Amino acid sequence: MVKVRLEFSGGLDLLFGNQKAVEADIPQQSGHQLTVAEAMAWARDNLLTDRPELFMKGSSVRPGVLVLLNDTDWELCGELDALVADGDRVTFISTLHGG
Amino acid sequence: MVKLCGHCGEQRAVLRRPKTFEQLCRECFYTALEAEVHETITAARLFRPGERVAVAASGGKDSTVLAHMLTTLNRRHGYGLDLFLLSIDEGISGYRDDSLETVKRNEAQYQIPLHVYSYKDLYGWTMDEIVSQIGTRSNCTFCGVFRRQALDRGAALVGADKIATGHNADDVAETVLLNIIRGDVPRLGRCANIITGEDSPLPRVKPFKYTYEKEIVMYAYFKRLDYFSTECIYAPFAARGFAREFVKDLEAARPRAIVDLIRSAEQFRVPGRSSSSNSSSGAKAVVLPQAGSCERCGYISSQPVCKACMLLEGLNKGLPRLGVTRTRKTHKAPAVGGPAAATAAQLAAAPAAAVDPAAADLVAPQAAGGVSTAAAPRPEPGMQRCRISSCLQAQTGAASVQQCGFCTSPQQPAVCCGSGACGGSALGSLEAGGAPEADPPAADHSAALAGPGSEGSFAYLQNKGAIASHPSARHAAQ
């Protein structure tokens, strides 16, 4: 199990039962470190209450959803393959709402 | 693995800029983004010193970042702008209520004044009331048309020279695509302009025209700016739909696609009327609609009656589909110097009509200076307005004339404005609960109108002079 803080904002919180942050224990495959892709899929399968198509498209986030790992753009960390360790924070921010 | 900022080389990089792929730390990102917006503002000469600028504020991410950025840059670079926040309250409970709270906090955070105008004040209807009449199919049409005018009217009422909006690069790219898909050639030719307002009385500027949505959201996130991100309850997650999604897909594949779409649109040349004589090429020149002004409210319109007045007429008559469907024939063009032409002067001559003192200030001097759109004849002595507050019909005769011929018509109490001279005075009868056929006669109808809120209902007519006499309106009318 990996202890991860998942944060949802920019309207995504509405898809996750109005939760802005969840302290999650995410199971990992033995011998492998957890990746952002797995954490995301776990959130979709276990936390999402509404409209999964607004969160993910295929195996990644829907384009327009920003992802940060410990407040760093996931594009700098390896995106889907970025590794998530105990105590890490993964933030999902939708930019798709009006401005 | 920690990547260092590509600019300062000291701090940890926190994001990759989509346009340039630069990897920057927070501070360098703030500096870069602010410098870029400053560059956009100065290169396009968006503002002049001393201008009074309304920042269109919805409480959402773009307008919140815009308010923050403009106040920061105004101070840092000495733009000399008189900035204030301008919000429109559509009257959507649970959505706009909450976002207005955000805007009110922004007022305190950025130390610039806030002005709020509501659909109820301007048009007599809240969006909640409109939706209760028309359902949720065409509601965005009403809201969009009303909001566009509401910003202009609100800005004119508080004496703004310009409106700054938070439209970002992604929004502009979407608009370009939508206009291509719709074949809307006139709009395609101008939608990528950084200064717009050909069809509005006030110029509108987009300081974020080249700023990516991603960077706006990142800026707001890192700076912990206070913004509101709930979707409108009547259009959840539906905003502009597929075009928006398509732009994001393009961006994912190649981030420059957004700015390239904008650059493309900047290069479009829409053939104007002048080329229509040249038919040898076989291509038909696009006939651009000519801007005039609405005969009811004076707002810039290519039709005799503007879209908002059409929609309002439908609502007030209990025929809300009017103006939404395209089957209706357009009104006949008004005769030059007809009732509509006189209205700005009438408004100026009837100070009681002005609900907002600011409106009176704006209307009176400008109309008196003879700069209203149609060189309106001054009402002759002895003329007065019909007492129906929304009716703009001038009356000759003694004070005993209380209502104009249209408004007193017992056959048509609910459609007294059939002449086009009245901005929807059937409102009172609807509010009184009567179906149009069963309306009370005119006297009751006017009494209903004179009730609380009725003057405010038509406040949007009151600053007509201010809007009509704005330089851009005169320009458009020529």
Image (cartoon, coloured by chain):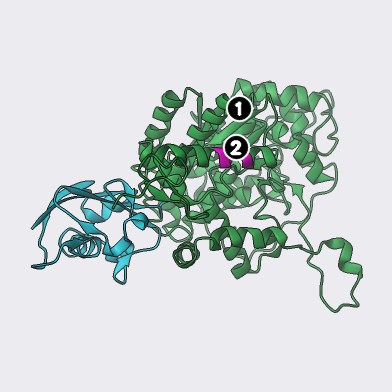
Chain colours: A cyan, B green
Look at label 1 and name its amino acid.
His
Residue B229 vs residue B459, the one in the foreground: B229
Q: Position of residue A58 (x, y in %)?
A: 31, 72
Can residue B291 be seen at all in this image of the molecule?
A: yes
CA separation, marks 1 and 2?
A: 9 Å
Q: Which residue is drawn at 54% across and 60% down?
A: B256
In terms of sequence position, does the residue under pointer 1 or pointer 2 come before the other? 2
Q: Position of residue B117 (x, y in %)?
A: 51, 33
Which of the 4 quarters of the picture holds residue B48? top right
Residue B30 vs residue B356, the one in the foreground: B30
From the viewer's perspective, tell me whether residue A62 is left or right of residue B56: left
Cβ atoms at labels 1 and 2 below 8 Å apart: yes
Can residue B117 be seen at all in this image of the molecule?
A: no
Q: Which residue is drawn at 57% across and 52% down?
A: B311
The residue indicated by pointer 2 is B38
Relative height, residue A57 to residue B104 (above, below): below
From the viewer's perspective, tell me whether residue B14 is left or right of residue B456: left
The residue indicated by pointer 1 is B77
Look at label 2 and name its amino acid.
His
From the viewer's perspective, tell me whether residue B293 is left or right of residue B174: right
- In the image, the segment drawn in magenta is B35-39
Residue B312 vs residue A84, the one in the foreground: A84
Report in which chain the residue with disc 2 lies. B
Residue B398 belongs to the span the image colors magenta: no
Please tell me if label 1 and label 2 are on a single chain: yes
